[in-house]
Amino acid sequence: CESDLDVEIRDPNITLGDQIFTSAEAYKQSLAGVYANLSLSSLTGPGGSNIGGLDAGTGQYMRGLFNLQNLSTDETIFTFENDPGIRGVQRNSASPENVLLRGVYSRAMFSVSLSNEFLRQSTDELLQSRGIGSLGDIQTYRAEVKVLKALSYYHLMDMFGKAPFYDETTEAGFTQGEELSRPELFDLVEGLLLNSLEDLPAGNSGEYGRIDQGVVHMILAKIYLNAEVYTGTPRYTEALSRSEAVINSGYQLVNDYQFNFLADNNSNGAQNEIIFPIANDGQATQNYGGTTIIIQGQVGAQEQNGEELGVNPGGFGGLFRLRPQFSEKFTLNPLFENDARNLIITEDRPISLVVTDPNTGYITTKYSNRTSTGGFGSDRTFTDADFPMFRLADAYLMYAEAHLRGGGGDLNTALNYVNSLRERAFGDTSGNIVSAQLDLNFLIDERARELYWESHRRQDLIRFGLYTGNQYVWMFKGGPSAGTSIDSFRAIYPIPSASLATNQNLTQNPGY
Amino acid sequence: GTVVDNSGMPIPGVNIAVKNTNKGTTTDFDGNYSIVLENGETLSFSYVGFRTKNIVFNGKNTSIEVSMVEDAEALSEVVVVGYGNQTVKSISGSVASVTEKDFNKGNIVTSESLIQGRVPGLSVTKGGGPGSGSEIRIRGGSSFNANNSPLIVLDGLPLDNSVADGTRSILSTINPNDIESFSVLKDASAAAIYGIRASNGVIIINTKKGRGELSVSLDVQQNITTIDNTVDVLSAGQFRTLIAENFPGRLGELGSANTNWQNEIYRDAKSSDINLSARGALFGKIPSRLSLNRSDQQGLRQTSKFDRTTASLSLNPRLFDDHLKVGLNANYSNEDNRFADGVEGNAITFDPTQPVRSPGSPYGGFFEFLDNDGSAASNVPRNPVSQLLQTRNISNADRLFGNLNLDYKFHFLPELRLVTNLGYDRTDSGGSLTRPGTSALGVNAEQGEFIGNESRYEQTRTNTSADSYFIYENDFNDFGLKLTAGYSYQKFESERFTTNEILDPNAQEPRTTVADDVVLIGYFGRANFSFQDKYFVNASIRRDGVSKFSPENRFEYFPSVSGAWILTEEDFLEDSNLINSLKVRAGWGQLGQQEVPSTSDYLRRYQTGLSNQQYNFGNTIVPFQPLYTNPDIRWEILTEINLGVDFELFNNRLSGSVDVFERTADDLLSNVPVPDGANFSNQGFQNIGEFVSKGIEVNLDYNVIRRDDLNWNVNYNFTAIDREITNLAFGQDIFVGGITGGTGNTIQVQREGAWPNSFFTYAQLYDQAGQPIEGAYADLNGDGTVDDRDRYVSGNGQADVLMGFQSNFTYKNFDFNFNLRASFGNDIYNNVNSSRAQLGNLNLVSPNNLPVQVLETGFARTPDVILSDFFVEDASFLRMDNITLGYTLRGFNRESTSLRFWMGLQNAFVITDYSGVDPELNISGIDNTIYPRGRTYLLGVNYNF
C-alpha cells in the first residue's frame, strides 16, 4: 500500500497551503501573520523562532532593531558581553559574522517573504477561484502588506544599505534575489509606499495597530529626511510636507509623556499619539523580545525595582544601562530635573560604566509594565506595553529639522511643535525655548531626550554626522572605555556572511 | 560425562555424534550426556560458538569429561543478518556478533551495556542517571545534522529511535537478561538490506527463545554506587578569603556555615536486580521461555530512581512435521521513574558559607537568598538540595512489545520458505511535575508569592511492522545458492497530551498534539552465491520509500555487493599449522538516511499561532504564517567500501579480524542557511554537504592458557577513525554546540576540512611565565584586529582511537574477569570552568562560588575568556569498566545444580589528564556538568537447576 506514504498532517495547528485560504477571515489571519513577525519570534511558543542562527528572543524583530539602533550609540550599554554579537555591536566593531546582524537581516527579509506570500495568495484570480469573491477589505490588506514590506526594506536600507530583491512573482524556495543598492532600495520603498497610499484608510482611523495613511506619511517623512544619507540627494521639502501630513492626520499628544510607554498604551490616550504600535501582550504575544526585554532589562540589579515596573522584582538582572554622555543630556542642566522625560535613576550609582558591573552607570524607567492607573500588566514575565515604532512627537521634531535644513515650512510652526513637546514634558512653559535656540545642535539633543530607546538614535547621529569620526565620542564608542573615533564605513553594517554566502548576487559593503 | 565451557559452566544442548555411525545425542541442561560406544569410535562434540572437539574412545573410560573451547570464528557459525541468517563462513561484509557468554558483566540495566567496549567500531557512551540511555555510534556515525544513532532491530522489529516521554531510553524498558545475541552490521554491504535507515549501521538484538529442556535460572544482585569525583570548587574558607580580597564590601552577606553543596546533592545509591527465567516444554510440546525481572535502581542524585518490572514469554512450537516454525515473543514492561533536575550547576555556584537548612525559612525550611521583602530573590541560584527534595517529577510507562514469526517450509518444495514477521510495540506513558507552594522554584503569582508547580502529560506511541519474504536455498554440486526477496511495511504513530503549567493562568492551554505518521515501505532482495565453499558473492538491493518526502523523491534504491575468498581452503594453505584459517573480504554498498525532525518539509504548510502566540488588532486575532518549504528534500546517501580479513593463527590460539573502510555521506541533510527572503526562514533542512569517514578496526582474541582447569583468554580491539567534512553549502560554516555563559553562545563549527562538531575558539596568548593573559587572543588572520574571523578549529570531542581490552580467567571453580577501555584524541571544552571560573562571578546578585581553576588563572571577566582555546582540554582516558570475581559450586544438591557467587567493581578507576569530573562525555565534548556515573560495588548470586 504505497498510498500509505501520503500521510496526513496531524498537528491541528498546521494546515496545508491549498487548504487554508477558505474564507475572507483566513486572509485577515494571514495578514495578522505578517504583522506578527514584528512582535513574535515564532507562532509556536515564547522560546521558538522562525529564523535560525541565533537565540530565539534575540532574533525578535524589535529587539534586533533596538540592538542595532540604540545599543550602538551613546544611549545604552548591555551588561552581558558574553552574549554573542553584543560586544561587536555596542563597541561598533561588528564583523560580518556577527549573529545579531544576521538576526536583523534575516528577520527583516522574513517580513518581505511573508508579504510576498500574502500578495501571491490574494490575487484577484485566486480570490475568485477560492470563492472569496470581492476584493473589498482584501485590497486594503494588500496595501498594508506592501507598506510592511516597504518598512522592512527601509530598515535594511538604513542599517545595511543593500538587500536582495524579491516580489510576489518569485515562488518561495531557494532563488537568489538580485542585489538592490541603497538608492535602488530607496526607490523601491518610496514606490511601494506611494502605490499603496490610496487603498488605505486615513491616519488614526480604523482598527488598532493597523497600517493607515498616517504610517505611510511617517515612513516617507523618515526616508526623505535621511535621503541625503541614502542617495546623496537631499529631499527636505518632501520630508517637511510628509511630516506635516502626519501632523494633520488627527493624531494628538497624550498628556503624560510616559503614558506612551505603559502597559495600557493602547488605551490610555497614547493610542492617539502612537502612529504605529507593535502590539505586545503578556498573554497573547509571549516572547523574549519587544518591550519584554526592554522592561525586564531596565530593572536595576541592586535596586530590584521590577515591582515598580510591573515585572518580577529582579527583572533580568540589570541588562541595560545608560552611557554617561546620554545621561548628561538630562543631568548636566538642572532645568531637566523637572522634565517628565527624565526617568533616570542616579542614586547609589556612578555615572561611569564598567560593562560587566550592572551597578555602574545610570538606569532608566522609561518603559513599564504598569498601567496609567497603577495596575499591573497581565503577566509578570511578558509585558503588555506596545512598542511605539513611530510617534507624533517625532513628526514634530522632523518638521522642525526639515525646516532648518531648508525644507520650507515656517519657523514659528516649528518652534510651536518643539515647545508643545516641552510643555508636555515640563507641565508648563518653563522649559520652552525661543526661536534663536532652535538649531540643529539643539534638535539632535532634543531628539535624544524625547525619543531615546525608541530605535532612532543611530540613524539620527548618522544624519547629523556624529556617529562615525571623532566629533562626538561616547563611552565605549569604538571599543575602549573612554571611547574613540570610528571609521566612516561603519555607518553601514556589514552584510552578514551567511546572507552573502547563500546569495551570490550580494556584495559586501566597503571596509568589511 | 559432562560438557563444560572454559569457565566451567555446563553447556546444555551440545551435539554429540559418533563419527561414521548414526549414533548421537545431546547434553541435557546440566551438560550431562550418556551414550553407548565401541572401542576406537570417535566422539565429535559440536556447539555453536565453540570449536568442535573430537575424542577417540579408548574403551576404558566410563566417563568422558569435555571442556569445550570458544572459537572466535565458530563463535557465530550462524549470524543474524537481517531477514534471515547467514553462515559465518559466507559473510563478506563487516558483521560482528556478540553472544550471551561474551556479554559484559556487572550492573547491566540497559541492554547496550552488554557490549560496551566489545566491538571495534562500536562506541557506547553511557549516561549517568539510573536506567539512562547511551550514545551509541557505529564508525562514528554518518551525519552531522540528521541522526547518528544506529538502527536497532529487536527480533525483526525496527525500533523508533526517539525516546518515549517518561522513559529513560529506547532500551531501558528491555530486560538485558532476555537478550541472547547482538549482531552489529557495520558496513554498507552488510547493512544495505535495511537500506532505508541503515546509514548509521544496524544493531540486531535477538532475545532468548523457548527450548524443550527444562531449566530454571535465578539471578540476584545487589549493588551500591558512590560518588567518585566532583567539580573542584572553592571551600568555604577559600571563598571567604577571595571575597575579602576582591569584594570586601560583600563580606557581610556571607554566612557562617561550611557547606559542600556537591556532597549534599548526592547519596550512596542502592540498587537491586532480580531475574527469574524458566525454559521448558509447555504442555510437553511447545518449547517455551518465561522470564520475570525486577530492577530497583536509585540514582546518585537525591530522589532520582528507576524501577522496572518486566515479563517476557516466548513460545516456539513447530507444526506440520516441522514445516511451520512459529515464534511468538510477548513482552510487557513497566518503568517507574522519578527524575532529578540537573542541579550540579547550582551546587557549584551556591555560596558555601550558607547552610542547607535555615530554621524558620518559609521555603520548606531550606535556605534561600531573600530580597528586601523577605521573599526569594530573583537572578540568584536556588538551593540545589531543596530543588531536588521539593521537585516531584515522576513518570510511569507501560510498554507492550513483541512479534509473531511464521516460518513456513513449503511441503512440495522444501528448499523454499516463506517467512512472515509481524511486530508491535506500544508505549503508554504519563508523568507529572509538582512542587509545593513552599518551593522558591514555583510559579510566581500576582503578589510575588510562590504557589508551586503542577503539570501533567501523557503519551501514546505505537510502532507496527509487517515483513514477508521468500527464501530459496539449494546447492548444485559446487555451487550454493540462496535467494531472499520480500516486502516490509512499518508505521509509527504518536500522540501527546500536556496540561502545561496548570497554576500559571498565562501559560499555554492544555494541548494534544498528534505527530504526523511516519510510514516506511521497502522491497528487498538478496542473493548469496558460493563456489566450492571458498568463493562467496553476496548482493542485495532494497527499494525504499518514506512518507517524509514528496512522491517524486520518496523512493530510492540501495544496492550492495560483496565477496569473500577463504584462502585456507586452497591447496597451498590447506595444511598450514601457522595459518589455520584466512579469509579476505571486500564489500561496497549504499545506504540511506531520512531522519529529519520535520516530517513534511516538502509540503507547503501554514502554522497557526498557539494560544500565547497571537496578535492584536484591538482584539486578539489568531495569525498564521507559511512554514519553511523544500519540495526537493530527499535521502541522504552513504556509500561505503569495506575491506577485511579474518584469520586464525598459531594452532588456533590467536584469532581476529582487520577491517578498513571509507564511507562517504553525500547529499547530507543539513539545517543550513538559505538565501534571506527566498523562503520562510533563513535556514532549513536541505540535501547539501558531504562528509567522509575513514578508519581501521582490529579485533584480536588470544588464548593465553588452555588447560582443563586453567583457562585464560584475552581480547583486544582497536579502532582508529578519521572524519572530515568535505563539502558544505556555499562553503558556509554552520555554528553549533550551544554553551552556558551567555545567551545563544556556540563553541562549535561545521566547517569544510574539519571534523564535524569541531571546537571553534580564539587562540589564547600566554605571558612569559606561561600564564594565560586575560582577553588576549592571537590575530590569526593578521588583519590587525581580533574579531569573529580570528576563531579557529582547536579540536573536537570525538576520539581518534578507541581500544577495548577484556581478560577472562578461570581456575577450577574461580573466575576472574575485567574490562578496560581507552579513548585517545578526544577533547573536551570545559564549559564548567569557562563560564564560571572568573572572579567577576563572585560578585553577582548573590556572591557565587567558583571552580578552583580561578586561583591559577586569576581570570576576572567571563566574556573576555569564554571563547578561548584555553578551555579545550585533552580528555584521553583509560577506564577500568568492570572487574568481577566469581566462585561456582556444582552438584551440591542435584548433580545438575550450580550456584555461583560473585562480586564486582564497576567503573573502578579512570586515568586521564582532564581536569573535570569525567573525561567520557557524549560525542559533543562540551562539559557543562554531567550526571556523574559514580563507582559501583556489586554482589550477586546465580542459581541454576
Image (tube, coloured by chain):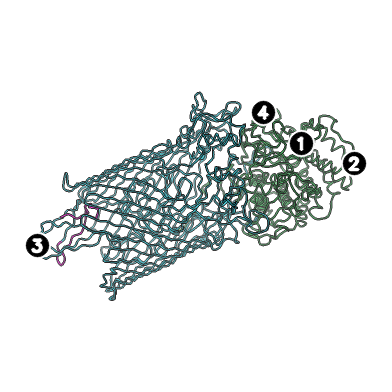
Chain colours: A green, B cyan
Kindly indicate whether the residue at mark 4 contacts the one at mark 2 (C-beta within 8 angstroms). Answer: no
Q: Relative to B715, is A257 on the left or the right?
A: right
C-alpha separation, residue under disc 4 versus residue under disc 3: 105 Å
Q: Looking at the image, which residue is at 81% across and 29% down?
A: A427
Q: Is residue A401 above or below residue B81?
A: above
Q: Chain of mark 4?
A: A
Q: Is residue B496 above or below residue B581?
A: above
Q: Quadrant of the N terminus of chain A?
A: bottom left
Kindly indicate whether the residue at mark 3 contacts the one at mark 2 (C-beta within 8 angstroms). Answer: no
Magenta residues span B1-23
Q: Amino acid at mark 3?
A: Gly
For disc 1, the marked residue is A272
Q: Residues within 10 Å of mark 4 (few under 14, many from 20)?
A: few
For disc 2, the marked residue is A411
Helix, strand or loop at label 1? It is: helix
Question: Quick one: which residue is furthest to the bottom in this view?
Answer: B572
Q: Chain of mark 3?
A: B
For disc 3, the marked residue is B59
Q: Amino acid at mark 2?
A: Leu
Q: Chain of mark 1?
A: A
- What x and y, as percent, mark residue B906? 36, 46
For disc 4, the marked residue is A375
Mark 1 vs mark 3: same chain? no
Q: Relative to B103, is B437 on the left or the right?
A: right
C-alpha separation, residue under disc 4 versus residue under disc 1: 21 Å
Mark 4 vs mark 1: same chain? yes
- The one nearer the camera, B882 or B406, is B882
